[in-house]
Image (spheres, rainbow, N blue to C red):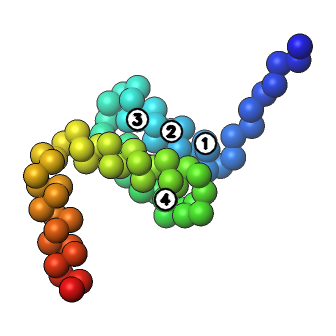
Amino acid sequence: MEKQTQVLTRAGQDYAVAYAAHYATKNLKEAFELYRGVMAAYPESQEAMYSQTQIENIAAALVPKQELFDARVNMVLARL
């Protein structure tokens, strides 16, 4: 059986760097900014979607649930 090599796209490479900052070095600030960069540079990519999920994971780890909920409520109210 032949070993298959996965070739990462530029979006995949950038996401991998962000993921490493997040989980390998635990540098949440850097990971957060890198994930935002992936989303800005490749908005239609799978990696942008993954990055959004990782940003939500960082927020959930750092911000109490009630604060996150209150912020969402306030955003909705501001648009009504």
Q: Tell us which disc is closer to us: 3 or 4.
A: 4
Q: Tell us which disc is closer to us: 2 or 4.
A: 4
Q: Is residue 80 above or below residue 65?
A: below
Element marked by disc 1: helix
Residue that carries the numbered disc 3 in the rendered image: 21
Residue that carries the numbered disc 2 in the rendered image: 17
One can see residue 30 in this view: no
Cα gap from disc 1 to disc 2, whole angstroms: 6 Å
Q: Percent x, y for residue 26?
A: 32, 30
Q: Percent x, y for residue 12?
A: 61, 44
Crowding at mark 1 (Cα within 10 Å: few <14, some 14-19, many 20+): some
Amino acid, disc 1: Gln
Q: Percent x, y for residue 25?
A: 36, 28
Residue that carries the numbered disc 4 in the rendered image: 39
Q: What's the residue at 69%, 46% (across, down)?
A: 9
Q: What's the residue at 10%, 52% (across, down)?
A: 66
| First reached walking from the N terminus: tag 1 or tag 4 | 1
Residue that carries the numbered disc 1 in the rendered image: 13
Q: Looking at this view, is 2 or 15 the one in front?
A: 2
Cα gap from disc 3 to disc 2, whole angstroms: 6 Å
* Image mark for residue 25: none
Amino acid, disc 2: Val
Cα gap from disc 1 to disc 4, whole angstroms: 13 Å
| First reached walking from the N terminus: tag 3 or tag 4 | 3
Element marked by disc 4: helix
